Image (cartoon, rainbow, N blue to C red):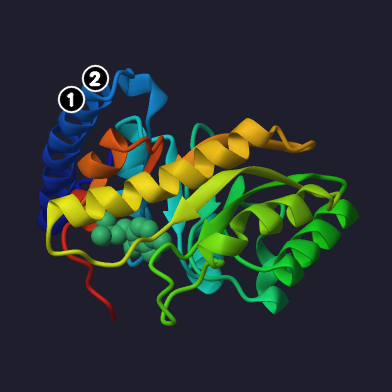
Amino acid sequence: MEKLSNELAYRFRQVEENLKVIQNNISDAAISSGRCVSDIKLLAATKTVPSEVINHVISLGIDCIGENKVQELISKYNTLDLTNCEIHMIGHLQTNKVKQIVGKVNMIQSVDSVRLANEIAKVSLQKSIETDILAEVNIGMETSKSGVDPNELEEFVCQLSEIRGIKVRGIMSIPPICEKKSDIRRMFSQIYRFFIDIRCKKVDNINMDYLSMGMSSDYTEAILEGANIVRIGSLLFGNRIYT
Ligand SMILES: *Cc1c(COP(=O)(O)O)cnc(C)c1O
């Protein structure tokens, strides 16, 4: 094996240590919420992270990564070892970029309009596949964030359920930054309620399997409130360096 640069070797060690801490916390939170650690999917949010480091976390057992930007996803795609790892799109997606990623990603978590869903479906059908998606809800109704209005979520999911070529697998959300842990927990619990309400309606052609919420600063609270996908970036990889 080729000798690693000191810098890379250092980064690998850091990521290993961070991962252990995160996995322990996930396990504790899962148990506290009456589930087991295998019920919770840890998605490594890999924006700005080089492929060598991503492949290292995959070798440590991470089986799901998420990218934010189409261009970055495409530029890394062929250098990633995705044999045992899923790749999800988690960032805002423009309709005109859909064709670049359908067939490459296992899931698109950031679907927030019928127009976008129709485009994903169209390209999927052209490739004779069905693409798993999550409906993104803007729980804080922040104008700066994507996602549908929570009051329109159920109607939105019902509209998506009728589109051939996509399959709704659950909900994703990025709640507003809250100073108090009790406030963030309340946000997560509201999202969970929407998730459960829709799941109980048993809409045809959708499976409310996944609730994707919680990031580096609040993933334990998210799990305690019912998340089963947490998306963790900086806590795992260190602070992001944008170039
Ligand atoms: C970057 C990102 C994350 C991870 O954020 P951290 O705070 O670094 O853990 C999660 N979800 C989305 C959609 C992101 O863009």
Horizontal and vertical percent position of residue 204: 79, 36
| Residue 234 x, y percent position in the rendering | 21, 58
- Which residue is drawn at the image coordinates 29% and 81% (left, top)? 243
Residue 213 seen from this side: no
Q: Residue at x 78, y 67 (%)?
A: 119
- Residue 154 on image: x %, y %: 64, 52
Q: Which residue is denoted by mark 2 in the rendering? A: 31
Residue 197 percent coordinates (x, y) = 56, 39
Q: Which mark is residue 28?
A: 1
Q: Nearer the viewer, residue 62 or 225?
A: 225
Amino acid residing under circle 2: Ile
Front residue of 210/184: it is 184
Q: Is residue 226 left or right of residue 124?
A: left
Mark 2 residue crowding within 10 angstroms, few (<14) / some (14–19) / many (20+): some
- For the residue pair 70 and 142, the one nearer the viewer reads as 142
Q: In which quadrant of the rendered view does residue 37 lie? A: top left
Residue at the spot 70% in from the left edge and 32% down from the top edge:
202
Q: Give the quadrant of residue 187.
A: bottom left
User: Which amino acid, mark 1?
Assistant: Asp
Instruction: Give the secondary structure at mark 1.
Output: helix
Q: Quadrant of the N terminus?
A: top left
* Image quarter where ligand 1 lies: bottom left
Q: Secondary structure at mark 2?
A: helix
